């Protein structure tokens, strides 16, 4: 089935210690990914790996496998971390998913980041698997140990934090009455070294209190781990809700908010004591006036001016990670846009629809389908009633909906959103590629794998590999038929990896057949491979690759022809043809699927096909004469391709 991994959207991981302190809020704009992790074929690890059973989707392809290792990194981590996997350095992209295609097997990822201990993470990727990892960082060089002990009473020797507000509702009322803003400190006071430093060096210093209390009501949201510190917290469950509400993912985090609790700036630890920290707070305060000006422009303008103002406000909200916390404001803006541009003819409605809709997405527990459905209905209604003027915006929102629905195996609905996203015709090539991969994965949600076969006799008889049809129920894509046609397994030979199928409705079989030849083949003979490599990942339709015979059958290659010819997953079961268009073998395997290995193709020779057919379909005539003439490969293509069909294995 389709396993959808949504990367970066409200991951639900516990906040961790962050050196700079500014724990990133919900990264609502991170791109979700859909990855198909269909169950793999049971292969003998010691044997050459079959090239068939192509998995219908995914973004990691190494040899036989569709295996992906995903790092869940914040924007700050992404800019600082260096990654090595199995001793090889990998670049970390500035945008999009941090994912690496790897071979199946055991791996070790080493993550290094300035100021933190390196992390060695060992993991195993099975065939067609996805592994996601969220690193937990520890400060380097014993820095935590050099700080005051975790058990030290917060503020020991200074004016402490016991008089700070802990109830945000009371703090908001107090701030409104006194005409102040809120200074909210999120800490892990008994386990986070940077928090202890911030508390002792700044937050409990008298000069800090004198300055900050002129303009702010002080709020402490502590998340301790020990009993002693926990006794000083009025309501641990309430604090946990505040951490989630404000999207705090690292400690310490400082949030400045207005008296309504709406944030306008986020910061963290600043080295140097009270002076540098207060300077940082002063800089953060400038965001308040910037926010107010942006919001006023949205409220007071109309038409194109409101669109421009809305775009700027959206960027500000994204930068602050604050969409979720401004939901009532966004709802008011959406109502204004719906009043002035109800059909999105000017492109105004979509700007404010995106803000409001993405705030809703950020608030949803992705495991709760009931809360997700109203949001997908909103987008479905917008798709029906309006047209996105910004094609990339339309593609992006529909992509998010498709990804979330795929998590709940709502494949039909998810497919509708993927198709709607593509119908917007986005300009962003990367977005288009993602939508296409999602669509392909969803269309094949019941597909285990695929391979190739070729018609050898009238009545719909098809020859292919045994490993292609080993799991699931075989269907065949027949030109002119809207749906794949069911096929029956007539005979199979697991040892030689050969199987014979017959279409349940032989009347739909194409008339073209291929001829099999057991004539002698020499090393260096030109050959062509016909098949459906990588399913539809490289475009629908049959593919032809050409090369030469590199080695003849012997015990080292399990009695198969060795080919200097490109062979990929999905080619298995396809015909290997000579330059006269006769089948001289059946593509079966690759010589080596190790990471970074440029392997050879391997094919069962026609003599094995002859022995199999003489036992199970003796009426098939086998030619043993040398070819009378050679043709150009485009002529061979016309002679052969009509008889070559894709085999799709579906769940029972």
Image (cartoon, rainbow, N blue to C red):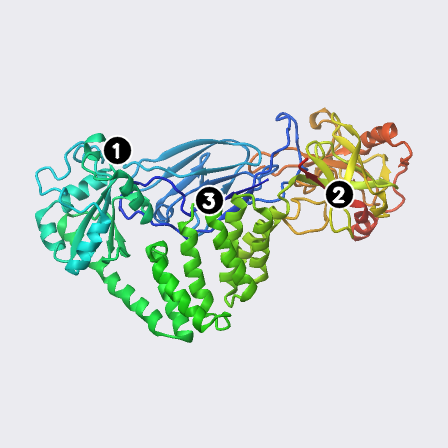
Q: Say which of marks 3 and 1 sits in front.
A: 3
Q: Is mark 2 on a helix, strand or loop?
A: strand
Q: Residue 612 location, x and y as percent?
A: 83, 29
Q: Name the residue under label 1.
A: 225
Residue beneath label 2, please? 476
Nearest to N terminus: mark 1 or mark 2: 1
In this view of the protein, which residue sits in the foreground, 154 or 235?
A: 235
Q: Is mark 1 on a helix, strand or loop?
A: loop
Determine which quarter of the picture holds residue 103: top right
Instruction: Indicate the position of residue 201 as horizontal and vertical percent values.
Output: 14, 44
Name above or below for residue 329 compared with residue 580.
below
616 or 108: nearer the viewer: 616
| Pointers 1 and 2 in contact (C-beta within 8 Å) | no
Q: Is residue 505 left or right of residue 384?
A: right
In percent of width and height, residue 158 lies at 9, 41
The dot on residue 73 is none
Q: Earlier in the sequence, mark 3 or mark 1?
A: 1
């Amino acid at each position: 089935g389709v396993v959808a991994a949504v990367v970066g959207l409200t991951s639900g991981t516990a906040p961790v210690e962050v050196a700079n302190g500014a724990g990133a809020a919900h990264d609502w704009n991170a791109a979700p990914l859909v990855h198909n992790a269909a169950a793999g074929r049971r292969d003998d690890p010691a044997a050459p790996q079959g090239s068939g059973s192509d998995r219908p989707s995914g973004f990691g392809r190494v040899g036989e496998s569709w295996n992906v290792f995903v790092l869940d990194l914040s924007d700050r981590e992404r800019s600082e971390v260096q990654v090595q996997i199995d001793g090889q350095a990998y670049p970390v992209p500035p945008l999009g998913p941090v994912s690496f295609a790897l071979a199946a097997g055991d791996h070790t990822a080493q993550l290094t980041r300035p100021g933190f201990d390196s992390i060695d993470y060992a993991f195993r990727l099975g065939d067609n698997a996805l592994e996601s990892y969220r690193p937990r960082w520890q400060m380097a060089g014993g820095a935590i140990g050099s700080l005051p002990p975790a058990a030290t009473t917060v503020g020991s020797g200074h004016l402490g934090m016991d008089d700070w507000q802990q109830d945000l509702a009371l703090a908001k009322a107090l701030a409104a009455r006194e005409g102040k803003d809120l200074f909210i400190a999120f800490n892990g006071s008994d386990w986070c070294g940077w928090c202890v430093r911030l508390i002792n060096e700044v937050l409990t210093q008298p000069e800090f209190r004198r300055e900050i209390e002129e303009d702010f009501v002080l709020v402490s949201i502590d998340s301790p781990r020990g009993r002693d510190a926990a006794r000083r917290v009025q309501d641990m469950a309430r604090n946990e809700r505040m951490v989630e509400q404000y999207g705090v993912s690292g400690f310490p985090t400082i949030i400045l908010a207005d008296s309504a609790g709406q944030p306008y700036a986020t910061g963290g630890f600043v080295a140097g004591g009270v002076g540098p920290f207060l300077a940082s707070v002063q800089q953060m305060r400038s965001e308040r006036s910037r926010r107010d000006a942006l919001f006023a422009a949205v409220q007071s303008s109309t038409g194109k001016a409101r669109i421009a103002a809305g775009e700027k406000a959206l960027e500000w909200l994204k930068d602050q990670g604050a969409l979720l916390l401004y939901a009532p404001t966004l709802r008011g803006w959406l109502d204004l846009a719906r009043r002035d541009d109800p059909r999105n003819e000017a492109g105004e409605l979509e700007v404010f629809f995106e803000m409001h809709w993405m705030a809703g997405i950020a608030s949803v527990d992705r495991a709760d389908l009931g809360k997700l459905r109203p949001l997908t209905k909103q987008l479905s209604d917008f798709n029906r009633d309006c047209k996105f003027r910004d094609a990339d915006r339309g593609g992006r929102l529909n992509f998010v909906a498709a990804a979330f629905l795929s998590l709940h195996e709502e494949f039909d609905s998810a497919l509708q959103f993927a198709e709607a996203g593509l119908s917007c015709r986005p300009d962003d090539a990367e977005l288009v590629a993602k939508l296409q991969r999602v669509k392909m994965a969803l269309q094949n949600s019941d597909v285990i794998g695929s391979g190739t076969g070729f018609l050898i006799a009238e009545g719909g008889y098809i020859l292919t590999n045994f490993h292609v049809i080993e799991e699931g129920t075989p269907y065949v894509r027949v030109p002119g038929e809207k749906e794949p046609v069911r096929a029956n397994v007539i005979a199979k030979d697991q040892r030689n990896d050969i199987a014979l199928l017959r279409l349940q409705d032989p009347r739909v079989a194409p008339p073209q057949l291929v001829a099999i030849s057991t004539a002698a083949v020499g090393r260096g003979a030109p050959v062509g491979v016909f098949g459906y490599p990588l399913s539809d990942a490289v475009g629908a339709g049959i593919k032809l690759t050409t090369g030469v015979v590199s080695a003849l059958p012997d015990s080292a290659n399990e009695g198969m022809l060795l080919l200097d010819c490109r062979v990929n997953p999905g080619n298995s079961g396809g015909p290997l043809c000579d330059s006269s268009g006769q089948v001289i073998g059946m593509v079966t395997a690759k010589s080596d699927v190790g990471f970074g290995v440029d392997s050879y193709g391997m094919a069962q020779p026609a003599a094995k096909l002859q022995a199999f057919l003489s036992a199970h379909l003796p009426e098939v005539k086998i030619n043993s004469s040398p070819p009378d003439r050679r043709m150009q490969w485009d002529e061979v293509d016309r002679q052969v391709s009509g008889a070559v069909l894709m085999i799709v294995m579906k769940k029972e």
